[in-house]
């Protein structure tokens, strides 16, 4: 069963911000290549590709299990309502595929270590 990972960001009218996110997606893809045969980035806002497009692309490339990671620090409205709603619709449209929403990464305890390292390096 091919596994896919889709990272979701808000998206920005500022092209550089979107490019930075997509570059991160490429770096993640290299690190999880043994676990995921396909890693894609998608955007919640008006930036493309949107979530539905990324899911459909993954399915068309043979993915039968898709994990979706919101690239958000907190479980605000987008993580708690908007993304689950989109994924629910995609699951209904693609019952042969398992689509799973992962927790937003801001809940990871290592985030505090990352922040501490960042502020220490800036001194």
Image (cartoon, rainbow, N blue to C red):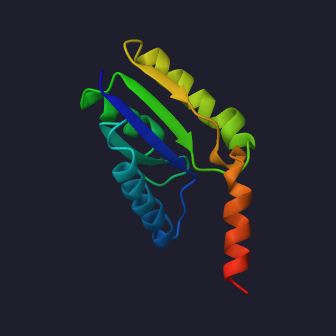
Image height of 107 relative to 82, above or below: below
The residue depicted at 73 percent of the width and 41 percent of the height is 77
Q: x and y percent of residue 7 in the render?
A: 48, 45
Say whether residue 95 is left or right of residue 77.
left
The residue depicted at 48 percent of the width and 60 percent of the height is 21
Give the residue furthest to the top. 95
Q: Nearer the viewer, residue 75 or 12?
A: 75
Q: Quadrant of the N terminus?
A: top left
Image height of 90 relative to 53, above or below: above
Q: Nearer the viewer, residue 102 or 56?
A: 102
Q: x and y percent of residue 14 in the render?
A: 52, 70
Q: x and y percent of residue 102 in the render?
A: 58, 34
Say whether residue 11 is left or right of residue 112.
left
Give the residue furthest to the bottom. 123
Total residue callouts: 0
The residue depicted at 45 percent of the width and 47 percent of the height is 42
Give the residue furthest to the left. 61
Image height of 117 relative to 5, above or below: below
The residue depicted at 32 percent of the width and 34 percent of the height is 58
Q: Residue 4 lies in what quarter of the image?
A: top left
Q: Residue 111 lies in what quarter of the image?
A: bottom right
Q: Quadrant of the C terminus?
A: bottom right
Q: x and y percent of residue 39 in the render?
A: 36, 43
């Amino acid at each position: 069963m091919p596994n896919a990972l889709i990272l979701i960001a808000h998206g920005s009218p500022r092209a550089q911000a979107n490019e930075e996110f997509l570059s991160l997606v490429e770096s993640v893809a290299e690190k999880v290549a043994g676990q995921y045969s396909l890693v894609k980035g998608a955007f919640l806002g008006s930036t493309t590709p949107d979530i539905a497009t990324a899911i459909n692309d993954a399915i068309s490339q043979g993915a039968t299990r898709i994990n979706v990671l919101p690239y958000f620090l907190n479980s605000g409205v987008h993580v708690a309502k908007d993304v689950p709603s989109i994924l629910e619709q995609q699951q209904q449209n693609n019952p042969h595929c398992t689509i799973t929403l992962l927790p937003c990464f801001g809940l990871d305890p290592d985030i505090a270590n990352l922040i501490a390292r960042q502020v220490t390096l800036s001194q």
